[in-house]
Amino acid sequence: MLSELAAGAALGLRFAPLYAAVTAAAAAALAGHRRAPRSRAWLAAVVVIAGWIAGDGIRIAGSSVPISTLVTWAVVGLAVGYALPALAGAYVGRQVHKGTGYLSAAVVALMFVSAVAAVTGPIADALMRAVS
């Protein structure tokens, strides 16, 4: 069971960085300016989930893996690669006082994705070595 969870986490840490960057930047820009209505948060969540499905969901669609691996992969990949960068960008964008909050939000989300992608690769490799 523990090896299945570790394999799922390793798969989740190997998210698609291009899809994640575009998705997180778009979602952060939607919700990340001071006067953004709260309804934009729902739209940003839809953008994040749709980007995750397009980027990572198709990659695992036909595979036959245990359900615990699949659920762990889904939670880790969605949270680490897509949702956290979008949330960080939206938070920063809401702190900007004069006019360019949406741009700040998008840039922070892009940089967050690239930083996370650089860090998670070695972690995923270590998890896969531990599982094997």
Image (spheres, helix red, strand yellow):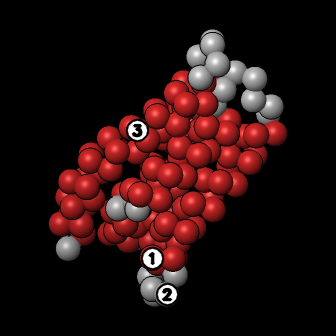
Who's the residue at 59% across and 16% down the image? Answer: 96
Q: In the image, residue 37 lies at what x, y percent?
A: 80, 31
Q: Is residue 40 above or below residue 47?
A: above
Task: Locate residue 89, reporting x and y percent.
Answer: 53, 33
Choose between 11 and 116: the one closer to the eye: 116
| Earlier-in-chain disc, 3 versus 2 | 2
Which mark, residue 112? 3
Residue 85 higher or lower than 20, as above or below: above
Q: Amino acid at mark 2?
A: Gly
Q: Earlier in the sequence, mark 1 or mark 3?
A: 1
Q: Which residue is mark 2?
A: 62
In this view, the residue farthest toward the top is 97
- The answer to whether residue 29 is left or right of residue 6 is right
Image quadrant where residue 10 sits: bottom left
Mark 3 and mark 2: Cα distance apart in space: 30 Å
Res. 39 image quadrant: top right
Residue 91 seen in the figure: no
Instruction: Give the image location of residue 112, x and y in percent.
Output: 40, 38
> Mark 1 touching mark 3, by CB under 8 A?
no
Q: Secondary structure at mark 2?
A: loop
Residue type at tag 1: Arg
Left or right of residue 71: residue 16: left
Report helix, strand or loop for mark 1: helix
Q: Kindly report the distance in space between the C-alpha atoms of the residues bearing marks 2 and 1.
A: 8 Å
Residue 12 quadrant? bottom left
* Label 2, residues with CA under 10 Å away: few <14, some 14-19, many ≥20: few
Q: Which residue is mark 1?
A: 59
**Quadrant of image for the C terminus:** bottom left
The alpha-carbon separation of the residues under discs 1 and 3 comes to 23 Å
